[in-house]
Each structure stands twice: as C-alpha cells, then as structure tokens.
Amino acid sequence: MQLHIVGLGVAEQAHLSLDAQQVLAEADRVIGSERQLQVVEHLTGENPTFRLPKLAELKALICTYEKEGLQSVVILASGDPLYYGIGRWFSHTFPEQQLSFYPAVSSIQAACHRLGLALQDVEVLSLHGRPLEKIRTQLKRNRTLVVLTDKHSTPQVLAQECIAAGFQKSQLVVCERLGYGDEQMRRYRATELIANDTEFDPLHVTVIRVRGSGGVLPEFPGIADGNFVTDRPNGSGMITKREVRLAILSLMQVCRDDQVWDIGAGCGGVAVELAYWNPDSEIHAIEHHPARLRCLKANQDKFGVVGNLNIVEGRAPAALAHLPAPDKVFIGGSDGELETLLEQVWSQLPVNGVLVASAVTESTKQHLLGFYEARLKQGDSYSQTTQISVNRGDQLAGQLVYRPALPVTLFCFRKATVNEEAFDV
C-alpha cells in the first residue's frame, strides 16, 4: 500500500500540483482533519474520507487499511508535511519506499513572505503540544523567531516570556488565518500585548523580533554560577563552577542524537548547559539528594530545557538500569560508588564513547588514577587528565585580592578498540 502525504498550503481552497490532484482523485481513502477535508472536498469526489485520529492510533488504522487490501491512502497535511508537519512522523514510522510526499507553502513561509523576512534569517520554534518554557532556549538578542503555537502559548504569554527574559522592546506580529479572505496581521510591542485581552484566531503564527538588553538567559556557554538556583546562596552550593564546567563541556564534545548521562548532577550546572546548547541530544541527570533535586528541577524550568533534560531521581548505579545506553558520560558525584561506576559505564560505552570524571578529594583522584593506569595497560582508551586551579577576585579592606578555590582534577577517556593505537593525549 502506498501512502501519499499531501500538503495543502495556505489557502481556503487547496492549490495542488497535478500529481497531488491525481492521487487525491484515485485514493482508496483520504484522511484529514475536518478543516482539511473541507479544503479538498471539491477534489476528492466520492472517495471515502476519514477523520484524522491521534498519532497513537494512526499507525494501527493504516495497518488495518493494508490488511483490507487498500492500495492508495492519502493523508492531508496543513502546509509542508516535512517542515514541522506530520511528514516527519511518517518518515520515522514507515519504510521510505512506501511514502510519497507532496509539498506546499507552509504557514511559516507565508508569514515570512508577508513580512519580507528571508527564511534563512529566522529561527522556527514549535510550541504546539510542547512546554511553553522551551522558548527560553531561543530568546536571544536580535533574533527573529517564527513560533507555531497552541492554546497554552498565546501571543500574550509569549510577550510575557520576552519581558521576563529582559527583552521588553521585542515586537510581536500575530499572523491570523493566513491565506483566507479575512487574513490579518497585527503588530504589538511586548509591553503593550501583555495587557491586551484580544482573543486571537486559533489559526495563527506569531513572529517575534527579539529586542532589548536581555542578560537573563544565556547567550554563550559558561552560565554564571549565580544565575543557577542552588542549595546555598549566590551559586555556592552543589554545582560545578563555571571555569571547570566549560572544560567539561569541551572534553565531552556532545553531538546530535547523543545519549548523555550526568551522574551525581547536583543542582544541574553541567546537565543544564549540556541540554541548553545541545537541543538534539538527550541528557539524563541522575541525582538522589532531595534539596538538590528541587534545585535541578528549578533550573530545568528556568532555562527552558524541558524537552531534552530527563531528571532521574535515584542513586547510581541502581538508577542507571533503565536508561538508554550512553554515548557520553560525566561523573560529578559518585556517593562512594566510583570504582563500580567507572567499570559499569566503561563496559556500556561504545567505541568513541567518552567518559569524563572530576575529582576534588585525594581519594577520588586515586580511584581515577587507578582507572587511568588500567586504561593505559589495556590500550583501550585515548586518555587525558587536567588539573584546574582558579583564583577569583574579591575585596579585602577595600582592596582587590584573589581567593583560591580548591583545585579540580578532570579525567577524560575516549574509548578505542583494543587493536587501535590508543595513547595518552
């Protein structure tokens, strides 16, 4: 059975290519929302139609059609099926040879063309069915965002997020019912919009020109310690300090689609930065201390890393049992289980997987030195170690002094096959 995913564009009546019109006319079944089916009813003729179910039920429905012997099924999509549309789900669910796609202009493209915005100059963010806090990862100075919204991310709520992030001067354009006869574009300053009680049409896109001084959300790796919620004042609690955190981020080199474990995450300094700067990776932060867990959750919300930061309440190694196999691991705290954790994590890492661990106490350092020497003996790792000592400026009797922090030793191991020429770097 062939599945045809047809984009309808932005119009009251679909303007389709000849190929799309043909598959609609010949389809054994046409699936779409009520609005979508109305848009193509002049093209479907007597062909049977079916209301689009939830995605959780859609695969079973299509399998039923296949068992019934249907040869051609059309699924309608609002705009471009493969740009924040249902097409991606089909690509991940069915074989490539079973799928045909028919693109059309999306509401994102239409909004940009109405406003004269080059698509390569904007960032697209979908909050449709996603946590509102996710916008906090995208609010940065002088960006232009095109936001797909739902009932929880109204233009007024987006304006409030801009103000909370220090972007009071932001301009928001609400693009309603694009392609329809009553289409309209309404422009607001963020400070004006939060007090506006207008109910916008559900069929809208919001364009945000981010303006203002900002300074609340990070623009570059190395978030100031004081910006984190911690279990002690002024960022002095259980959190990896900025200078060390930057070195850890550099050593781990997290990539797209990586599964990352942060064991002993504390208040979340490393986990939050990993999730913030790597939105296409999954970060699993393992922590058991109740106060630190509360801080970790607060930082997850504060920085908007609600989509790819998974907080795991529990004590390693037991808490690791049901996690996806890791590509990269950071051990910041081991609660006396370091030797066991090192062996377990190393056995689970794939070739080129990375293990980074930090040590402040001499006993922790000795465990890691033993593991370092074992890796050299086995020849199964590219290994390096660095000690970081930081002296921070402070005031004493009105004079500048530098106060030393405890040195932190970092160990980094990248897994090699035994027959590779592994060496100490």
Image (cartoon, helix red, strand yellow):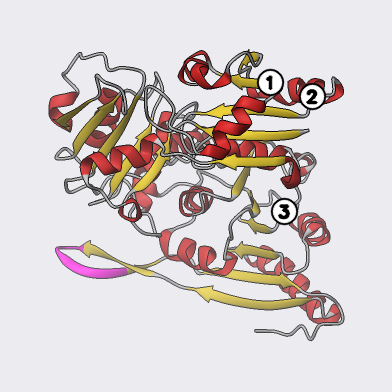
Give, as a single range, the part of the protein colored magenta: 396-402
Q: CA distance from mark 3 to mark 2?
A: 42 Å
Label 3 amino acid?
A: Pro
Q: Which residue is mark 3?
A: 326
Q: Residue at x 64, y 64 (%)?
A: 356
User: Which disc, if any, is residue 29?
Assistant: 1
Give the amino acid at mark 2: Leu
Where is residue 206 drawn, in percent x and y? 30, 32
Q: Residue at x 49, y 55 (%)?
A: 240
Check contact, mark 2 vs mark 1: CB within 8 A. Answer: yes
Earlier residue among tags 3 and 1: 1
Structural distance between the alpha carbons of marks 3 and 1: 43 Å
Q: Amino acid at mark 1?
A: Arg
Which residue is denoted by mark 2 in the rendering? 70
Q: Is residue 60 magenta?
A: no
Majority secondary structure in the magenta region: strand
Circles 3 and 1: CB atoms closer than 8 Å: no
Circle 3 or circle 2, nearest the eye:
2
**Does the CB distance between marks 3 and 2 fall below 8 Å?**
no
Find numbered disc 2 in the image and state the secondary structure of the residue it sits on.
loop
User: Which mark is first along the chain, 1 or 2?
Assistant: 1
- Left or right, 420 with respect to 125, comes to right
Query: Helix or strand or loop: what does disc 3 sit on?
Result: loop
Q: Is residue 163 left or right of residue 407?
A: left
Q: Report x, y in % for residue 6.
A: 56, 33
